[in-house]
């Protein structure tokens, strides 16, 4: 076997302290961005539920207090189309709007909820309640008032 004999000098990366500082900084920045995505998407989810149930008429009566979110295999949350009123009654968009419109409302909501996942669990899980698993998937209900009150920055 022939020994490896380099012909050029090794490259010189920045000093170990500079690399360690850069790693710490970028990880902190990433965590901040992931949490911000969680906050913004939780707020958007609350706004979207309100918009669905009021037809975007923000002066219309509105009584949703929680929205149901199901965790899929990829650990992203998706709206099932169910919600609870302030009185605790479980309803669905299908109940309210029929099959096609109710399904479309849930699909529209999932444009936002899919960004809620393990990377920002520290944001949405404290404002959510764990429900019984369904078909091996974790199920949560998110408090809409708490979600709407999260800071956007």
Image (cartoon, grey):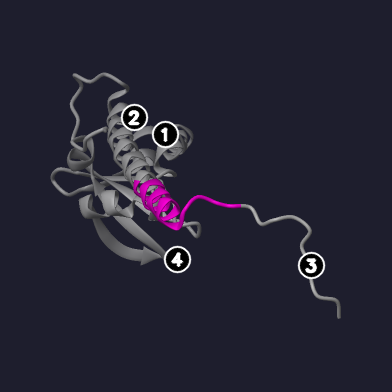
Q: Main secondary structure of the magenta part?
A: helix
Find disc 1 in the rendering and name its residue.
105
Mark closer to the chain start, 2 or 1: 2
Q: Quadrant of residue 130?
A: bottom left
Find disc 3 in the rendering and name its residue.
5
Q: Determine whether label 3 and label 4 are within 8 Å by CB.
A: no
Mark closer to the chain start, 2 or 3: 3
Q: Is residue 65 above or below residue 108?
A: below
Cα separation between marks 4 and 2: 27 Å
Q: Which mark is residue 52?
A: 2
Q: In this orientation, which residue lies closer to the viewer: 91 or 76?
A: 76
Cα separation between marks 4 and 1: 23 Å
Q: Determine crowd level at label 4: few under 14, some 14-19, many 20+ residues with C-alpha closer than 10 A.
A: few
Q: In this orientation, which residue lies closer to the viewer: 45 or 105?
A: 45
Q: Quadrant of residue 51?
A: top left
Q: Determine whether label 2 and label 1 are within 8 Å by CB.
A: yes
> Which is more foreground, mark 3 or mark 4?
3
Give the structural element (helix, strand or loop) at label 2: helix
Residue 115 is covered by the magenta coloring: no
Side of 129 relative to 108 (left or right): left
């Amino acid at each position: 076997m022939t020994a490896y004999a380099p012909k050029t000098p090794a490259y010189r990366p920045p000093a170990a302290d500079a690399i360690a500082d850069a790693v710490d900084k970028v990880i902190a920045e990433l965590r901040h961005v992931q949490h911000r995505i969680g906050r913004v998407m939780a707020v958007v989810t609350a706004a979207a539920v309100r918009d669905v149930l009021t037809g975007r008429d923000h002066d219309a009566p509105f009584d949703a207090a929680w929205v149901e979110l199901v965790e899929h295999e990829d650990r992203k949350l998706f709206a099932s189309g169910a919600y609870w009123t302030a009185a605790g009654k479980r309803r669905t968009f299908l109940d309210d709007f029929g099959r096609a419109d109710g399904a479309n409302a849930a699909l529209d909501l999932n444009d936002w909820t899919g960004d809620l996942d393990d990377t920002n669990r520290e944001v949405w899980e404290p404002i959510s309640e764990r429900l019984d698993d369904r078909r091996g998937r974790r199920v949560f209900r998110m408090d809409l008032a708490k979600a709407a009150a999260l800071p956007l920055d």
